[in-house]
Structures are given as structure tokens and as C-alpha cells.
Image (cartoon, rainbow, N blue to C red):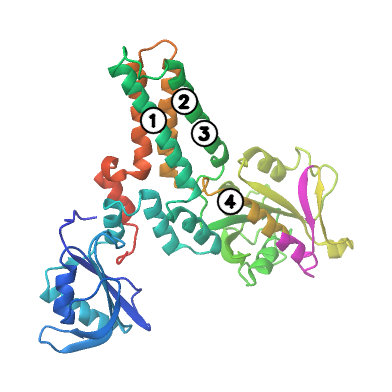
Amino acid sequence: MIQESLDDTIIAQSTPPGIGGIGILRISGEKSDQICEKILKKRLKPRYATYLPFYGSCDQILDYGIAIYFAKPNSFTGENIVELHAHGGQFVLDILLENILRTCEIRMAYPGEFTKRAFLNNKVDLVQAESICELINASNKESIRRSIEHIGKDSKYSMELRSIKRMVEEVESMIEIEINFPEENISSPVHLIYKRIQNIISKLESIFNKAHKNICISDSIKVAIIGKPNSGKSSLMNLLSGKETSIVTSIRGTTRDVIKENMYINGILIQISDTAGIRKSNDDIERIGIKRALNEVKKSDHILYVTDNICEGFFSKKNYILSFLKKNLKSHQSYTIIRNKIDVDRLLSKVTIIEGCNVIFLSVRTEDGLNILKKHLKRTIQRKNHVESALNVKYRYYCFAKKALKHLKRANNLSCYQSVEMVAEEVKSANRYLNQIFNGKKYSSQKILNDIFSNFCIGK
């Protein structure tokens, strides 16, 4: 982001470009009310919607619409804000915007500049600011829910970390009193200081123990379909997606690349990947496809292992695919075995557990057992998404809190045999990292702030 001046008054279109019922221009800055009078020929009462004409440079009427004035500090940015609600034709909005830029002391806003000003004016913290961006870009109900949980100052995640931050500040004050007034009776016993530090460490570790599996849940759950050639992987892909996405033939090794398709289950976006059949092959191109299939497994949240037979030795180490899953899957990943072609063997559709593995019996050809699979996927996805808001955090904040924990542990280890001054430095360092989460205005570098807010759309 280009270096901008906070003294500038800025403008941008807040609604998406294109034709719509209403188009909104947002103005923020010290001169917003003056610009408003110039465009509207009228002084607006704060927080009242007023229907009136919008004037051009030669007093010609460019449009009729609604104007709303928000006086500082009671606005989104903490500055004077004017919103012009015009008719939603893009040409109309372009004419209005061009006229305002040409005749008033104002400039175009940079991406995310409105929210950045809200942050710099202490209207939102960094967690809330990024949650606003995530809410705008959300592609499913679960993403919306998580974003909303973080936007409010009373969100569980914010409240937990703010509580820890206050505790660290209290310990910092206790240590300062101990250092500056050692002979007075106003200082706290040293053992009480260390007990407080240990309590904070315990609370932070409790958060990390829950969060390490789910640091940053993405907008979509990734599901990979794997198995040997001709087991029915591509047919299952087409059945789940409702499209002829994958080519289905009787020729082994037809799928040689990773084919992806999106679908929704219970309002949650799932990205399904159909992969090459896994087997020993002398074909160089097929081997590349197999390698990509195994790499896709490592990137997926859940794996559907399709097989047309569960014979003796299937669950042993001789089964390369199953052994690969057990060896390479991380703690947050899971898999389900799909026993396909039950119509051929005249088996009943069902979900069961064999050798500790979830197994679903179905037929892709007859679709018998398809609903069982969908319900199973729904439950699996809900388990992956049903986590406390404290877990759904940006990796950046996880790192800040982790570094704070590291300094608190150092302080605790120093406590037995080092000076209180050294403990004080470690506690101060911990507090600095916690401040990065909530008060980045003071501690974050300009580059970090620019990186964060440049991801926003113009007008937000």
C-alpha cells in the first residue's frame, strides 16, 4: 500500500461495481461535512437519512438519492463520514465520483483504508479488522459464523486473550513495585508473582492444547478420493458433485491428474479431489499422477479411500495405501474406507467400524448407500468445524501468543535463581507480543499493517 496521509479526506465506492438497485459512495475525513454541503447544498443532521438531489459542478442535478452523515467519533472510522446512496447504475456512480474528485479536496481511498482508519482510531483491533475482511470474502455459512464471532469485542477469543493480557499487565506492575520499592510494605510477595506467572502460562497452554489442530480453518474442507485403479473413484466424484467432472472408463489409469470440484454439504463448502489410481506402474506419466495423488492426501482434511474388495490382509502392512494413510496423516486429518460395488457382491449398504476404521458399504452404480455417505461426511465436517472461537484464529495471532508464552516460561524458569529485573524484562516482552494482537497501532510495523489492509477491497 502506498503511504497515505490520515489528514486526507478519502472517497470510494462501497458497493460492488456493476448495475444494481443502489450504489453507495463513502466519504471519510475531516472535510467530509464540508464536501457534503458542496454536493448537497445542505447541512445534514448526524444519523438522519435525508432524500435530496446530488449536484454537479455547475449546479446541475446528477441524481436524487439518500445521504447520511456520521459525525466523529461515532462512525465506523472514528472520523466524519458521509454516505451517498445513489441509483445503482455504474455510469451514474462514476459521474458522481468523478465530479466529487474534480471539485473537492479529496482523493480515492486505497484498498482497506477505511478499516485501517477504524483500527488506527481504536474502533477495531487487528483481530476484528481481519475478521471483517474474512466476513466479506466468506464462501459458506461456517466462515460467516466464525468471522462474526471475532468481530465483536465480546467474542470469546478476544475476551480470553484480553483477560490474559490484563493478568500479564498486573504481574508487570507487581514486579515494578518490587523493583522500585523493595523496602516498602506495598510490594507483593515474590512467590505470589511467580504463582501469577504460572497461572498465566497454564491458561495460554490450555488455549494452545485446543488450538494446535485448528489454527486456521480454511473456507473449504478439502476431501481427497483415492484408491487403486478402477475401484470407482471417478464415478464417486461424479456422483457426489452431480457433474460429469471425471472421465469414467474401464481402462486402468484413466485419471492421471488431480481433478477438483466444489460442492456444499450442510452449508459448508467442500472441495473434492479425484486422484490417479495408486498402483505400481512403469508408465512415467502415470507415476507422476500417483505422486500427485499422494501429495493431495497430505493437503486434505478428509480422505475417502475407495476399494472394491476388503479381503484378508486388507488392514495389514501389505496394503500400501492404508499403510501410507496411517503413517502420513496428521492429527487433524481423518479418512473413511469406501467399500464400493456392493451390488456385484449382493451386500447391504451400511456404515461400520472394522479394525478401528470407519467403513461405508455402498454402490456408486446403483447409488445404494449414497445417503449414508453424505450423512457421514456431514458429521465429519461438523466435527471439524465445531470448535470454539478461540481456536479459529489467524496464524499471526497464534504466533504472537506463542512468543508471549515463551517469554513467560523464561520468566518462570529465571524466578528460582535470577534477579527480579531479568524476570521483569521477560514479562515486558510477553506483554509486547500480546499488544501486537490488540494494539498493533503502537507495536506493529507499517509493512505488517499495509499487508493486512491491502487484502481488503476498495471501499472497505
Q: Hey, which quadrant is residue 56 in on the image?
A: bottom left
Secondary element under disc 4, as helix, strand or loop, is loop
Q: Which of marks 1 and 3 is nearer the N terminus?
A: 1
Quadrant of the image containing the C terminus:
bottom left
What distance separates the C-alpha of mark 1 from that of mark 2? Answer: 9 Å
Q: Which of marks 1 and 2 is nearer the N terminus?
A: 1
The outermost residue toward the top is 417
- Mark 3 highlights which residue? 203
Span colored in magenta: 356-375
What distance separates the C-alpha of mark 4 from that of mark 3? Answer: 31 Å
How many numbered discs sit on the rendered protein? Answer: 4
Q: Earlier in the sequence, mark 4 or mark 3?
A: 3
Q: In this view, does 243 lie to the left or right of 40?
A: right
What distance separates the C-alpha of mark 1 from that of mark 3? Answer: 15 Å
| Amino acid residing under circle 3 | Lys
Q: Earlier in the sequence, mark 2 or mark 4?
A: 2
| Amino acid residing under circle 4 | Ser
Q: Residue 170 carries which label?
A: 1
